[in-house]
């Protein structure tokens, strides 16, 4: 097996996308810029994946050197894509977390119209589960707690989105500050 990069990596997820029952993109995030760099290549890949999976009764597919786990609900198809060497169980845990979190915020009405009406919450959930291809969380309750969303509340408000983004920015700033300090001390040694 002559593969150039079999080293373990935190960057497990290559892409996440949600398609409707006609194969039209509702949401997509690609985390590997070299994988499908143009929108045309991404849509072509999504069309190939959809044509292979929309009538299948499986949960996993291998296409174009990628491992793809997927799930459907009413008129939606959810996909999580990883490399060919990626652990399918890890990808499936991401998919299940995404689906369960969305089921909660959409009040068990996981369909196209409800998804489109709550896109801001959908994007927040995806960002809490995966950041740059790194799996951050696989527990739907933790994800929902982080996005500060309760089933009995109204949909996410601008204030809660702003609060979430402010917290993310503060965390990023702390990480960068810590890295600067470590570099400074390593240079001074």
Image (cartoon, rainbow, N blue to C red):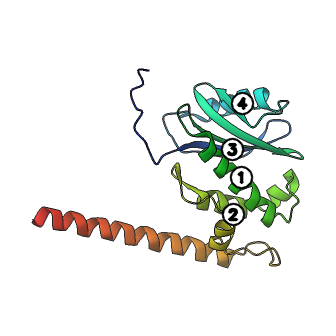
Instruction: Report the Cα–Cα distance between label 1 and label 4.
Output: 19 Å
In the picture, measured across the screen, residue 157 lies left or right of residue 177, that is: right
Dot 1: what SS? helix
- Does dot 3 land on a helix, a strand or a loop? strand
Dot 3 or dot 4, earlier in sequence:
3
Report the disc number at residue 140. 2
Query: Which residue is tagged 3?
Result: 17
Instruction: Report crowding for label 2: few under 14, some 14 to 19, many 20 or more residues within 10 A (C-alpha).
Output: many
Q: Is residue 57 visible?
A: yes
Question: Along the line of sight, which residue is nearer the eye, 90 or 175?
Answer: 90
Q: Are marks 1 and 4 in contact (CB under 8 Å)?
A: no
In this view, the mark in front (2 or 3): 2
Work out how far the residue at label 2 is from the one at label 3, CA to CA, in angstroms.
18 Å
Q: How many marks?
A: 4
- Quarter of the figure that contains the N terminus: top left
Whole-number angstrom distance, CA of label 2 to CA of label 4: 26 Å
Q: Is residue 36 above or below residue 110?
A: above
Asked if labels 3 and 2 touch by Cβ distance under 8 angstroms, the answer is no
Could you tell which of marks 2 and 3 lies nearer the N-terminus? 3
> Residue 49 has which mark?
4
Q: CA distance from mark 2 to mark 1?
A: 8 Å
The local crowd at label 1, few if under 14, some if 14 to 19, many if 20 or more residues have their Cα within 10 Å, is many
Q: Compared with residue 94, is residue 86 higher up or lower down, i.e. above or below? A: above
Cα gap from disc 3 to disc 4, whole angstroms: 11 Å
Q: Are marks 2 and 1 in contact (CB under 8 Å)?
A: yes
Q: Please identify, in this view, whether the residue under mark 3 or under mark 1 is nearer the observer.
A: 1
Residue appearing at x 65%, y 26% in the figure: 63
The disc placed on residue 96 is 1
Expressed as whole percent of the image width and height from the top left, the position of residue 14 reads 56, 41
* Residue drawn at point x = 90 percent, y = 47 percent: 74
- Which is in the foreground here, disc 2 or disc 4? 2
Q: Residues within 10 Å of mark 4 (few under 14, many from 20)?
A: some
């Amino acid at each position: 097996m002559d593969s150039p990069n079999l080293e373990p990596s935190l960057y497990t997820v290559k892409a996440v996308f949600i398609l409707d029952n006609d194969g039209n993109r509702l949401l997509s995030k690609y985390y590997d810029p070299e994988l499908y760099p143009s929108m045309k290549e991404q849509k072509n890949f999504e069309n190939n994946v959809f044509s292979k999976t929309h009538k299948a009764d499986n949960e996993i597919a291998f296409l174009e050197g990628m491992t793809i786990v997927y799930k459907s609900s009413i008129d939606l198809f959810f996909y999580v894509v990883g490399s060919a060497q990626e652990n399918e169980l890890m990808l499936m845990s991401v998919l299940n977390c995404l689906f369960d979190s969305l089921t909660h915020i959409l009040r068990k009405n996981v369909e196209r119209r409800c998804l489109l009406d709550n896109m801001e919450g959908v994007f927040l959930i995806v960002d809490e589960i995966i950041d740059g291809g790194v799996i951050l969380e696989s527990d739907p309750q933790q994800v929902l707690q982080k996005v500060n969303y309760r089933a009995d509340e109204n949909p996410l408000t601008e204030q809660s989105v702003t609060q979430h983004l402010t917290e993310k920015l503060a965390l990023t700033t702390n990480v960068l500050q810590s890295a600067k300090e470590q570099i400074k001390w390593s240079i001074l040694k």
